Amino acid sequence: MKRLLLLVLLSSIVLSACSKGGEVDVSSRYGNTMDDFEVVDQNDETFTKADMDGKVYLVDFIFTNCTTVCPPMTHNMTSVVEDLEKDGVENYAILSFSVDPKRDTPEVLREYIDMYHINDLNADWTFVTGYDYEFIRKFSEKNFKTIVAPPPEGSDQITHGTSFYLVDENGKIIKDYSGVDSGDKRFPKEEIVSDIKKLTKNL
């Protein structure tokens, strides 16, 4: 009996060590798989959920005319990509949904990409549009539990969430992070980079 208890104790220690070293501490809010979708990317080419298969994705919601949260979000996403590329991480990609699809045509998205020198990163970063406002409002709420709302009266600034979302190679949303500094909470770049490395390690 003592020997059995010792074996159980040793096993739990080993499992605990493996968990701390190699698994992502996931958010309990998620665990759902993204719905199928078909949209258009910055090159005016079709992009679907099937195109995400086999890669770990970091997803956000932005729009190019945004004057408040989107510039720091894009800057922070760029800094994540720079670290991942510097460390030679593979099998990951970035997906940015426009919440202002009427204004954000593929041409406008390409201008935004040029403004932030995103092509210089040599990373797989896709910006998408080609749907209507109702699609992105419902899609973001159902899949990512985040808001997309019309601009307040007298403004052209769409209300939307500022989180980054971690999606595994099977399209399952497993975690979210603040995409900007919020109050006394700093943008968790090191945590995001670490989580992506863990998820892509065996792909």
Image (cartoon, rainbow, N blue to C red):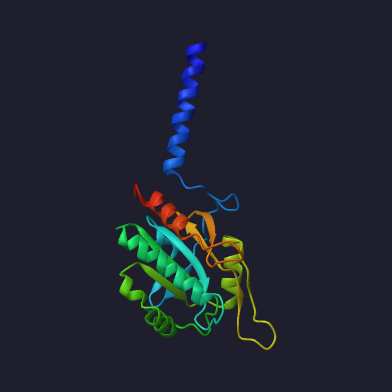
Q: Position of residue 6 (x, y in %)?
A: 48, 18
Is residue 169 at all visible to an observer of this figure?
no
Residue at horizontal 43%, vertical 37%?
A: 18
Depth order, front residue of 32/178: 178
* 101 to the left or right of 195: right
How many numbered badges does the structure rendering display? 0
Q: Position of residue 187 (x, y in %)?
A: 51, 63
Q: Residue furthest bottom?
A: 154
Is residue 174 at all visible to an observer of this figure?
yes
Residue at horizontal 44%, vertical 52%?
A: 195
Residue at horizontal 45%, vertical 44%?
A: 23
Q: Position of residue 66 (x, y in %)?
A: 54, 81
Q: Residue furthest front?
A: 184
Up the image or down, 128 lies above or below 21; here it is below
Q: Residue furthest right?
A: 153
Q: Residue furthest top?
A: 1
Q: Position of residue 140 (x, y in %)?
A: 58, 66
